[in-house]
């Protein structure tokens, strides 16, 4: 049964919502003036065209309107629905409607009473929010960082793809779980308390690295960098946590730090080497000059000693006693030893200060060792053992250089055995390399001195210039070889020479 039109108009004419009565056969029986504001068509236009409602429905919602009418007729129950209409000016209008079936005395639906509210602004806002949320979701998912939102209880309410990849938890697994899921057991209580305090009180989050290591789903721990942002919505506080995995960065930083340290060491080493090279060059220039200047007076002394010996042997004088003559000869021998020592120093100085150009020749090494031993004075309490096989081949070397190196090494070995011992000289082959060892059973070399042995001017002897081993190394390198040393205090020392059988190999 219908309300009277007069009474209905009095109730609804001033309403902002569109109210109407639609007869299923005759069209609109009533529609208030709000229709003009909402859809742009006056009540009179609705009365004049009973199909107007179906003409101005949005094409995409036409089927929904037909279904609405059908449902009202068949189900005979009120229906709430949202429909789009085309305003007279062409704009799309969203309405929210409540439609109620009207029955005749037989219970048949003959009309529809309804009320429609313009919700265009709300729908546009919803669409904008939806689009904004989607844009944020797309931006958040594009980020390689983990972006996580938590509420004031520390529960996760947003979880982007970066978080899923970083931690291994899916969105469904992470949502509504506690953020403590990602935190080490020992840090959980402290972190959650700080988080809740920060979110709910509005206090500034402490500027300290309270979360430096996170835990993946598989239990793996990894270093992180974290930033926090707080916002409020509808009276509630939330926290956005941005997490960056810095594993790779730490590896790079550690690598750079290590490389920097290595480069620093290289620079320092090269600086030391440069200073040593400059020092050696200066020493070389000085030694070459000193060696040259001493050579002439030394040669004069050698000549004088020769003449004195010759005079003693041919002297016609008989007033010199036999004993006196012997004592004089002993003094001459001592003088000759000192001259030989001075000559060795000069040779070392000259070899150290100049570049060496070996004159290679096939050399019998056993014979070379015999000649080198003949050039030194071996104490009676030292036993000499030579272990050189008969099949040991000739060496393509500068015999003078290698003999000098062997003399230096033999002298060192003898001086290392003041109380007697054994001097062992071995030679063998290893492929295309000759292996030569000069071994003593002397006092040995302390560990702290081992890396200084081939340093110019380093010596532990009360009488020595610290050039012997340096010159040895230089002579051997000039012949394409190298020298090394092993020693143990109280046991002895072994100098090992390695020479190529073919020069340059």
Image: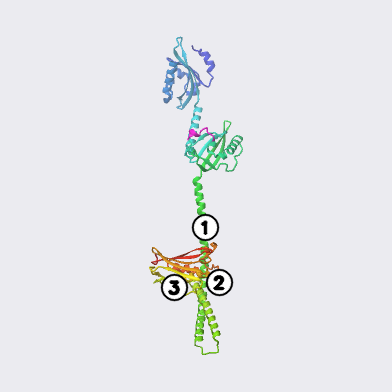
Residue that mark 2 sits on: 463
Q: Regarding mark 2 in the picture, which secondary structure is present there? A: loop
Measured as percent of width and height from the top left, residue 308 is found at 51, 84
Measured as percent of width and height from the top left, residue 100 is found at 48, 17
Residue at 47% across / 14% down in the picture? Answer: 102
Measured as percent of width and height from the top left, residue 8 is found at 52, 15
Q: Regarding mark 3 in the picture, which secondary structure is present there? A: helix
Q: Compare marks 3 and 2 and give the one earlier in the sequence.
A: 3
How far is the residue under mark 3 from the one under mark 2? 26 Å
Measured as percent of width and height from the top left, residue 110 is found at 44, 13
- Front disc: 1 or 3: 3
Q: Compare marks 2 and 1 and give the one earlier in the sequence.
A: 1
Query: Would residue 103 be visible to someone looking at this image?
Result: yes
How far is the residue under mark 1 from the one under mark 3? 46 Å
The crowding category of the residue bearing disc 3, from other C-alpha atoms within 10 Å (few below 14, some 14 to 19, many at least 20), is few
Q: Is residue 106 above or below residue 467?
A: above
Residue 299 belongs to magenta span: no
Q: Is residue 264 above or below residue 137?
A: below
Give the residues in magenta.
Answer: 170-178
């Amino acid at each position: 049964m219908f309300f009277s039109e007069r009474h209905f108009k009095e109730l609804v004419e001033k309403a902002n919502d569109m109210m109407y009565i639609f007869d299923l056969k005759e069209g609109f029986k009533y529609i208030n003036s709000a229709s003009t504001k909402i859809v742009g068509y006056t009540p009179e236009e609705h009365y004049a065209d009973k199909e107007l409602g179906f003409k101005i429905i949005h094409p995409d919602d036409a089927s929904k309107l037909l279904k609405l009418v059908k449902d009202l007729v068949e189900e005979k129950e009120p229906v709430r629905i949202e429909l789009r209409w085309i305003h007279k000016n062409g704009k799309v209008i969203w309405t929210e409607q409540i439609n109620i079936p009207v029955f005749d005395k037989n219970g048949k639906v003959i009309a529809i009473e309804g009320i429609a509210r313009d919700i265009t602004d709300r729908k546009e806002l919803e669409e904008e929010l939806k689009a904004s949320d989607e844009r944020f979701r797309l931006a958040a998912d594009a980020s390689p960082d983990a972006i996580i939102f938590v509420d004031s209880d520390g529960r996760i309410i947003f979880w982007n793809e970066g978080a899923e990849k970083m931690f291994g938890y899916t969105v469904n697994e992470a949502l509504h779980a506690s953020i403590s899921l990602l935190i080490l057991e020992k840090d959980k209580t402290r972190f959650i308390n700080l988080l809740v305090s920060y979110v709910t009180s509005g206090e500034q989050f402490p500027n300290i690295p309270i979360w430096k290591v996170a835990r993946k789903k598989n239990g793996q721990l990894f270093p992180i960098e974290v930033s926090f942002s707080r916002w409020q919505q509808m009276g509630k506080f939330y926290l956005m946590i941005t997490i960056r995995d810095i594993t790779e960065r730490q590896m790079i930083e550690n690598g750079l730090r290590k490389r920097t340290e290595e480069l620093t060491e290289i620079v320092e080493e090269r600086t030391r080497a440069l200073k040593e090279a400059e020092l050696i060059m200066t020493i070389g220039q000085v030694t070459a000059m000193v060696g040259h200047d001493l050579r002439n007076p030394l040669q004069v002394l050698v000549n004088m000693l020769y003449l004195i010996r010759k005079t003693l042997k041919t002297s016609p004088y008989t007033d010199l006693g036999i004993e006196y003559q012997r004592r004089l000869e002993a003094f001459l021998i001592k003088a000759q030893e000192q001259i030989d020592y001075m000559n060795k120093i000069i040779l070392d100085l000259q070899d150290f200060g100049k570049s060496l150009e070996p004159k290679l020749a096939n050399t019998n090494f056993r014979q070379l060792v015999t000649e080198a031993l003949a050039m030194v004075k071996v104490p009676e309490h030292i036993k000499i053992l030579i272990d050189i096989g008969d099949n040991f081949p000739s060496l393509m070397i500068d015999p003078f250089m290698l003999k000098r190196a062997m003399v230096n090494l033999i002298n060192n070995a003898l001086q290392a055995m003041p109380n007697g011992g054994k001097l062992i000289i071995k030679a063998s082959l290893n492929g295309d390399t000759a292996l030569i060892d000069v071994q003593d059973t002397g006092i040995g070399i302390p560990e702290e001195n081992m890396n200084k042995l081939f340093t110019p001017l380093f010596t532990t002897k009360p009488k020595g210039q610290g050039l012997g081993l340096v010159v040895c190394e230089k002579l051997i390198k000039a012949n394409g070889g190298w020298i090394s040393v092993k020693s143990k205090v109280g046991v002895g020392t072994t100098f090992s020479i390695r020479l190529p059988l073919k020069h340059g190999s």
